[in-house]
Amino acid sequence: MKNYITHDEWCIVENGFHPEFNEITESLMSLGNGRMGGRGNFEEKFSGKTLQGNYVAGVWFPDKTRVGWWKNGYPNYFAKVINACNWTGIDIEIDGEVVDLNTSKVLDFTRTLNMKTGVLERICTIELTGGKTLKIHSQRFLSLVDDESGVIKYSITPVNFYATAKITISLDGDVSNKDSNHGEKFWNEIAKETAHGEAFLTLETKKSAWDTVPTFQVCTGMTFEVFKGLEKVDFATFPIKSEKYVANEFKINLEENQTYTIVKYAVNLSSENHTIEDLTEDTKSYIAKISQKGFEQMLAEQTAAWAKKWEGNDIQIEGDVAAQQAIRFNIFHLQQTYTGEDARLNIGPKGFTGEKYGGVTYWDTEAYCLPFYLSTSEQKVARNLLVYRHNHLQKAIENAEKLGFSDGAALYPMVTMNGEECHNEWEITFEEIHRNGAIAYAIYDYIRYTGDSKYLEEYGLEVLTGISRFWAQRVNWSSDKNKYVMLGVTGPNEYENNVNNNWYTNYLAVWCLKYTLEGFKTLKNQNLEKFNEIIEKTKLNFDTEASKWQHIIDNMYFPYDENRQVFLQQDGFLDKELLTVEAITKHRPINQKWSWDRILRSCFIKQADVLQGMFFFEEDFSIDDLRRNFDFYEPMTVHESSLSPCVHVILAAKLGRKDKAYEMYVRTARLDIDDYNNDTEDGLHITSMAGTWMSVVKGFGGLRVKNDKLSFEPFLPEQWEGFSFRVGFRGNALNIVIKGNNIKIENITGDKIKVLIYGKEIEVGSKSSASVEY
Amino acid sequence: MKNYITHDEWCIVENGFHPEFNEITESLMSLGNGRMGGRGNFEEKFSGKTLQGNYVAGVWFPDKTRVGWWKNGYPNYFAKVINACNWTGIDIEIDGEVVDLNTSKVLDFTRTLNMKTGVLERICTIELTGGKTLKIHSQRFLSLVDDESGVIKYSITPVNFYATAKITISLDGDVSNKDSNHGEKFWNEIAKETAHGEAFLTLETKKSAWDTVPTFQVCTGMTFEVFKGLEKVDFATFPIKSEKYVANEFKINLEENQTYTIVKYAVNLSSENHTIEDLTEDTKSYIAKISQKGFEQMLAEQTAAWAKKWEGNDIQIEGDVAAQQAIRFNIFHLQQTYTGEDARLNIGPKGFTGEKYGGVTYWDTEAYCLPFYLSTSEQKVARNLLVYRHNHLQKAIENAEKLGFSDGAALYPMVTMNGEECHNEWEITFEEIHRNGAIAYAIYDYIRYTGDSKYLEEYGLEVLTGISRFWAQRVNWSSDKNKYVMLGVTGPNEYENNVNNNWYTNYLAVWCLKYTLEGFKTLKNQNLEKFNEIIEKTKLNFDTEASKWQHIIDNMYFPYDENRQVFLQQDGFLDKELLTVEAITKHRPINQKWSWDRILRSCFIKQADVLQGMFFFEEDFSIDDLRRNFDFYEPMTVHESSLSPCVHVILAAKLGRKDKAYEMYVRTARLDIDDYNNDTEDGLHITSMAGTWMSVVKGFGGLRVKNDKLSFEPFLPEQWEGFSFRVGFRGNALNIVIKGNNIKIENITGDKIKVLIYGKEIEVGSKSSASVEY
């Protein structure tokens, strides 16, 4: 755990340079706008610890699967998020000396990510040889408005000297991934040009061995202006070209105590959004457009755009700056990563903050991220996340076929870019099949929240049919148990592999069969034509398949401990030595300190598994059920998945366990800022950030949807004076303020609305508010 | 399955050239002498399908572990058997045309491996351009007597032309492994020299990242003579040198119908057996020694040495040439691979016949190979195999420590070269721990056979202590079952992974604890001083540890089906859909046709698991026990491990299932010759060859050791007229002849001996024989 980031309500501040933590800071201060993003690297050369990273949404490379021992069914490739052209470079030499914060003496330094505006700012003073003092001030942002562009305002001030500065403004596409084999580079150069004050570079991803994966082209362009003080100055540039690199170099005679500013405008256009033929021309027009706008106007638009986002989704916490900073940090990065504009995109586990994991879509999207977007964005954003999976249905069917399933059974990939599986651990790829259930659950969750029940007939039932068929083929009849069983599964708790009858997966499967059947039955009554259309499209033999599904629903086996009256995570769980995490304090984190088999044999749980199921289907269980299971499993849980604490916040809150809920909240909210898991340098845990949001809204706010109404059962942590959050719900925008024992519902936009507070219905008029003591 | 090898009692014959199967033939015709070996490649250039392979025993390279997802505890490297200098090259050009069987027209062709003498011979006639007919006759062997050398006699006869031949006699060290990354080469050149008619090349394996692995140097040397007819001729040579390559080139004016012969002598000396300083000089003296001996004398010695080997271990089968050929093929390759001279060496799964798998030591050695060497070689050979593991005890303790075990617990590696683990699948590396039991069992098996009970105090008890400590830490108490359980295990049936309470492993563990305790108790009574010495050396707290061991022995859980009265392969086995292999004929082999998870969920068994245990500990079970378990498990067994059929031959024979026993015998014996598993091209299944030997001797011969006596319960397959085999036993050499219902015991050397025939004791006088009807 680290503690060098200054606590501040709106900003992530590094006060004083911490080069040893630079890669962590770069992760924390990453910028994105949904279309492109990158880490908080310095603009000028830096020879110290750094992970240079710029990324373009939807652009990736299929890297050949590497395993020691091939298992049948493994995918051919692993989809890599690839490092793209570094458009941020502004290199400075003063009288031949390279400005580099690793070699110069840093006199003062502040790096700030302003989350209110999405601007990364750095103010520092360094000492060059001979006592030359240079001040650097840089501001950088990726425009939310012109979302294929970024802009930098970079100033230097020679405090106490005159000198000649050589300045190189570059686009550098000669980059490689940190995790690539033998430093392999994934880009080929297609074209480049450079003229006075501008440069363009078109790269294409290397052709891979797999036909299903296209190559991508990205054209990066830039132009820049130079100012002496506030006055724009002319300069003579030298164009520089080398492999996958274009730059403009120029010299300035620096005068003492005079500020020189470079404003660099850059764009990244990808063949995903532009025809290849027009890529360069489009880039040129785009560059022209934003440079005409100018930095100040772009900044004003950026500030306004972020203000609008915050208006819809800010959470305010009173009396706890660390908690306030943390929740905004989580919301900020979620919003940067996925804007929901494009149904082809999804939420990568590291977003635009690092290379690790690859792929962009995990079950995290459905289980953790969807609720955030449901409450804080337009309905279409969440809907796009669902449609994304519908678009991949055929691939999911093919994926299941590769594993021996048939007749339209669909298994969605564990990790994917384009619908094809790209993960290669058998115990995960083939066995962590509960992801299929989360995709079904998301449909239910979306309709429950939005009331958009049409979604089911439009897209949902097709997906549910594929998934239900998978479950029906995946279970088998145990003559020994006289029940259906599900063998060879890995649950959400990945510290168990290849187990039989994982309670969560079995429960999810049965729920999914039920939900699908209900969906079909309702549709049959309401719209026979549409029903027949789906039957036709899915080639569903409704009588046979539905009765098989019903038989499974009626006869599924669920492991249960009669003694403790708890659901058993899987068969044989009670054979383990049942310890609590207190017994292994010195051994944590076990994923770093124990061998894999030791982890597997132990009772210790990586993330909520039975409890994840009880969270999803809470109406099915009494509070006593929940308490018994929570008390059994939580003490064995090491929360070594970033997705774990949030579920525990929500359940602990429900059980009135204030301390546990707060403890878990801090863990999830400041996971990256304080580097709890010692891995923030690889990038941020983007998807679990949505879990943090859920912790506050569903945990402390107690938000649920019950019978088409929003329901709140709030709970104020003792460490807080109060908190408030925004939610959108079916045309209403509400601000919820919790203070002491009071909850205030402000109905900001929309008609009057009925909400439940601890089960009691109250009505809040349009543009009005209501307070309730609880 | 292929069927192109001519059936012959002593030879493997390829009649007519089968270039499409050339890699298979190269595997089948591999040569070895325990110190070096190689595949049956042609001497001259061949541009068709070929896997060039030459290997030096004990020389290997640690290749970096490659996995998609790292698991804690994985070894750093995978030990690769590396392709070494090709010393066989004799390239021929006739009037500028390269002699290459892939481009020339092959008029007639025979390639023969004579297993009686260990000589590979090829006689062929080819047509070059312009109708030039050339006859080639080559003979090659690796000397058993001078076991760091090989020799080639290579003749060409221009049948119908005069021409100039350019002949290049080479040593080519510029080789790479087929499975290396990006064609990486593992050798560096150290020195080379070439003079008239001779050449020397010293290579060193690349330095690796791991200190525990030394580099190896190998000096390869050669000299040659040229004959016109029988007359030695002089010739002018041109030395050729390039990277890792040395050769001599010379030209001869060929006369029609005249035979020209090259005799090439080569040696491979490795730094494992020679000091690096003397490597070149030793090579030169060695070359001088063998070339002075000459080809004919070397051949005579070779023939005599092989005759001696066959005298001790031949198996004769009457009335079934295919079976006869097959059993000799198995015995021949086993003898070539491991001679037992060197306790540092072991039996690689592919021997000197291919690169696949890497490592040299698997549990195959103890479970399958040891009985062969016990019966057919001097006692020291089997003893050396045991001492090999004793030498690695400290490494096995360190290996266990890496996985979290302590206090002297030892886990022998799954795959190793030097005692360090080098396998990297968690479900195997960390979980297939029954290997530890096989190592303990081998000690028992060795002592039972040889009567060398001193071995226990000299080496055995130390190893058994380490292994017993491992079991005692590996089990845990299940309060649910009120028994000890063993969780997270992979049994011999690798088509199940990470199961709980694998019956075989549990049984083996308990047996091992018992055997260790008995060993200590006996020693304490017989030799207190030695007892104390071992206690001291192993730091054994005898009272505490022994009573823990006893508690486990008394309270171990064994899964059992009361209904069927069979032992259950593991917990939950009965939840599977129980089918027989008939149900999946179209799906076999499942390891090529099914995804890994489907294999795991199915009931199908790769190789004997419960039955392996019943084979090891047959005295513990009644024939009815065996029948029930055999009838339950065998029908589910797909035998996709080469180690499976032999155990089933032996058990089927015991149960009087003649057809099943014969069916399984053919499968194990002709596995490689007929390429049952479609993988002979990668190399031969060396270790399972010992299982084939067991099939005959323990299966059809019914050989056992009972109370220090050899016991036979023979059984003649209907397809055979009779069979005989040799066994050595405690100073006696016996020839056992089974014909009809008669068994004849010929006591060839040694004193009179008492043997049991179907439980009845008979005495056979020295150099005498006895016949019994059964």
Image: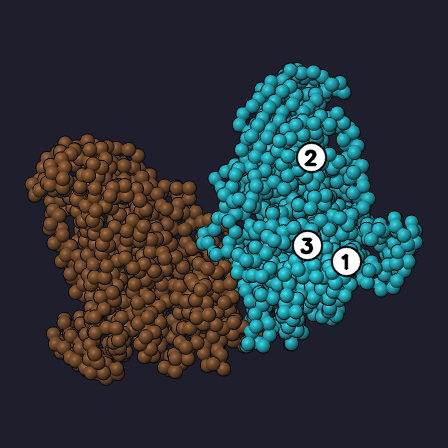
Chain colours: A cyan, B brown
Pointer 1 indicates a residue of which chain? A
Task: Write the residue at 70% across / 27% down.
Answer: A285
Q: Which residue is mark 3?
A: A366
Q: CA distance from mark 1 to mark 3?
A: 18 Å
Say what secondary structure mark 3 lies in: helix
Label 3, residues with CA under 10 Å away: few <14, some 14-19, many ≥20: many
For badge 1, the amino acid type reads Ser
Residue at horizontal 44%, vertical 60%?
A: B591
Q: Quadrant of the N terminus of chain B?
A: bottom left
Asked if the residue under mark 3 is in contact with the one under mark 2, i.e. CB atoms within 8 Å, the reply is no
The answer, for residue A706, to whether it is visible in the render is yes
For the point 39% across and 66% down, the residue is B639
From the viewer's perspective, tell me whether residue A727 is left or right of residue B475: right
- Give B349 or A625, whichever is nearer the viewer: B349
Work out whether mark 1 precedes mark 3 in sequence or the reverse, and give the earlier one. 3
Q: Is residue B568 left or right of residue A305?
A: left
- Residue A238 coordinates in the image, percent (x, y): 60, 18
Q: Chain of mark 3?
A: A
- Above/below status of B235 relative to A375: above
**Residue to which mark 1 is pinned:** A453
Residue furthest left in the image: B231
On screen, residue B530 above or below A240: below
Q: For the C terminus of chain B, which image quadrant?
A: bottom left
In the image shown, does A685 or A512 lie closer to the viewer?
A512
Q: Position of residue A321 (x, y in %)?
A: 77, 46
- Residue linked to disc 2: A148
Q: Earlier in the sequence, mark 2 or mark 3?
A: 2
Q: Is residue A266 left or right of residue A473?
A: right
Identify the amino acid type marked 2: Glu
The amino acid sitting under disc 3 is Glu
Do pointers 2 and 3 mark residues of a single chain? yes
Question: CB under 8 Å between callouts 1 and 2?
Answer: no
